[in-house]
Image (cartoon, rainbow, N blue to C red):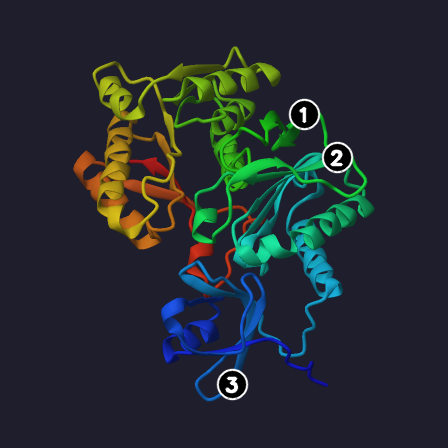
Amino acid sequence: MKAERIYPCCTVTAKAEAAILRGHPWVYGEEILSMEGSPENGGLVDVLSRKGRYLGTGFFSGCSKIRVRLVSRNANNRFDAAFWERKLRWAWAYRKSVMGAEDLDACRIIFGEADAFPGLTVDKFHDLLSVQVLSVGMERIQDLLLPTLVRILREDGQDIRGVFLRNDVVLRDKEGLRQGKGWYPLPGETPPASAVTEFVENGVRYLVDVENGQKTGFFLDQKYNRRAVGRLARGRTVLDCFTHTGSFALNAALGGAAHVTAVDVSEAAVEMARANAARNGLADVVECVAANVFDLLPQLEKEPPRYDLIILDPPAFTKSRKTIRNALAGYKEINYRAMRLLPRGGYLATCSCSHFATEERFVAMLHDAARDAGVQLRQIEARQQSCDHPILWGVEETSYLKFYLFQVV
């Protein structure tokens, strides 16, 4: 028996219908042809084709260009507490299934649209949850979602002591939401005294500050790529560029690298990497240096060769299509320099975390850099983000990380 339709209905264009049928969950404002009823900001609406076909139900945003974000394509669903709890349990069960138990100490539990929680990110760092709420629909039901998720995790033996909201994000402005950060008040509980915790990833121990760290506190999407670099690093002299917290450097050192130089332009990041090296007993292997990678690589070309494994893990050089040309020039520059620095038989780990630097463009850039450097690349592995950041087919925004391991020949 179908659930009674109780929500306002919007009829969408053929273009929007085609995108939804391909799997994309967004409807833009200009794609709405008509609206029946008065949708509340952050409330649910049904989406219909021009012929009245039910396409899905999603949260309405009166401020954003993305006017509707679908959460279901099943007309029989009732969007009550049981529905949301079921979806939260599915998300946690997925992580438990695709990741080993040892990898659950730090993982992404909710990855927005890929888990059908559009605009919601939840990262678990040992006993803390770091949360970003970037859509008005998720904001509206966060008091249902967050206590329920904590209960699910605790029932499964996870010792969660607090939930920190990292809503200091410009994207909230587009939803008409205020920016800010602070502890989420779990009912009947006193917020923790500290937003700092320690977790273990790939055998490496880190301190993370979920209040002040970048984004949710730490980048979890390279977990298995760091492990792949660690396997390759034994006995090698390694240069880790854009090291941030030192995660690639520490995986290389733990993997048996002879020496690792970890470089970042941020003094604060370098201090954090240095502290993490000491925490893991690797201070004698990992040297942390504050420098601009774009200046350092040309300078190293003038010196005797010393590195046989170079890691390039830059920040996203572009966050829009308008600046993609400049971003690709930046990617090419560092890859070209790294290829020239490496001896024949040396190894290169290189990546891009920008969705707009597509796989096709990134690969074309690597071909150009290799040609200009006068080297050939022997591909070892092509990888993507870790499986707790699932790629949802039909939603290209969920596929953003490109990671390659090469031997330079």
Q: Is residue 314 left or right of residue 248?
A: left
Q: Please report whichever mark, 2 or 3, sits nearer to the chain's N-terminal start.
A: 3
User: Looking at the image, can residue 339 be seen?
Assistant: yes
- The C terminus, quarter of image: top left
- Which numbered tag is attached to residue 239? none
Secondary element type, mark 1 = loop
C-alpha gap between disc 2 and disc 1: 10 Å
Seen as rendered, the residue at the extreme front is 38
Q: Residue 181's spot in the image, x, y percent?
A: 57, 36
C-alpha gap between disc 2 and disc 3: 46 Å
Inspect the image, locate mark 2, and give the three-letter code of the amino acid beneath it. Answer: Arg
Inspect the image, locate mark 3, and give the three-letter code of the amino acid beneath it. Answer: Arg
Secondary element type, mark 3 = loop
Q: Which residue is mark 2?
A: 161
The mark tally for this picture is 3
Q: Residue 5's spot in the image, x, y percent?
A: 64, 80
Q: Is residue 98 left or right of residue 326?
A: right
Circle 2 packing at 10 Å, graded few (<14), some (14-19), many (20+), is some
C-alpha gap between disc 3 and disc 1: 51 Å
Residue at 68% x, 68% y is 79
The answer to whether the residues at label 2 and label 3 have Cβ atoms under 8 Å apart is no
Q: Which residue is mark 3?
A: 53
Q: Which residue is mark 1?
A: 194
Q: Residue 91's spot in the image, x, y percent?
A: 66, 55
Q: Quadrant of residue 394?
A: bottom left
Q: Residue 268's spot in the image, x, y percent?
A: 46, 19
